[in-house]
Amino acid sequence: LEALSRSGGLRDVKERNMEISAWGRVGEHSRAVRCLQEMTDAGVAPNVISFSAAIAACARVGQWQEALLLLDRMSDADLAPDVISFSAAMSACVNGK
């Protein structure tokens, strides 16, 4: 994944969302969150799916504070959290460390 990302192989929001989800599935929440920032840096606007995937990555490892920060950042990006976003944030709080 990292080599693909560095090579410029991930161009659109859909591909970057898949990357965020993949990092989350393998328990690399910090890498998933970093990918979210890299999207913005590359001029690709994250969407609700992007944030939800990053929040879910945080939930998998109990990083509730980071999950809630991401939920707050959605508002800053003029995105309305959906049921998946809220559900992932709640899971992070339940699994919190």
Image: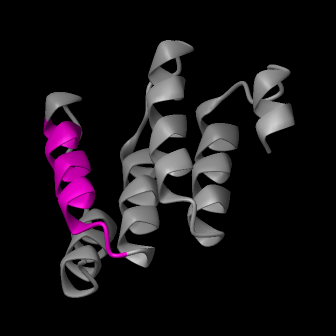
Rendering quarter of residue 96: bottom left
Q: On the rendered image, what quadrant is the C terminus found in?
A: bottom left
Q: Residue at x 80, y 20 (%)?
A: 8
List x then y, in percent, for residue 21.
59, 59
Number of on-image labels: 0
Is 57 displayed left or right of 85 in the figure?
A: right
List x then y, in percent, for residue 77.
23, 29
Rendering quarter of residue 78: top left
- Foreground of the two, 30 or 35: 30
In reply to whether residue 23 is colored magenta, the answer given is: no
Q: Residue at x 15, y 30 (%)?
A: 76
Toward the front, the furthest residue is: 97
Which color scheme does this rendered protein use?
one colour
Residue 90 in the image: above or below residue 50: below
Residue 81 in the image: above or below residue 27: above
Q: On the rendered image, what quadrant is the N terminus found in?
A: top right
Q: Residue at x 84, y 34 (%)?
A: 4
Magenta stretch, residue numbers: 62-75
List x then y, in percent, for residue 7.
85, 21
Rendering quarter of residue 90: bottom left
Q: Main secondary structure of the magenta part?
A: helix
Residue 58 in the image: above or below residue 90: above
Q: Residue at x 56, y 63 (%)?
A: 24
Toward the bottom, the furthest residue is: 94
List x then y, in percent, for residue 37.
44, 29
- Foreground of the two, 67 or 13: 67
Q: Is residue 81 visible?
A: no
Q: Is residue 94 visible?
A: yes
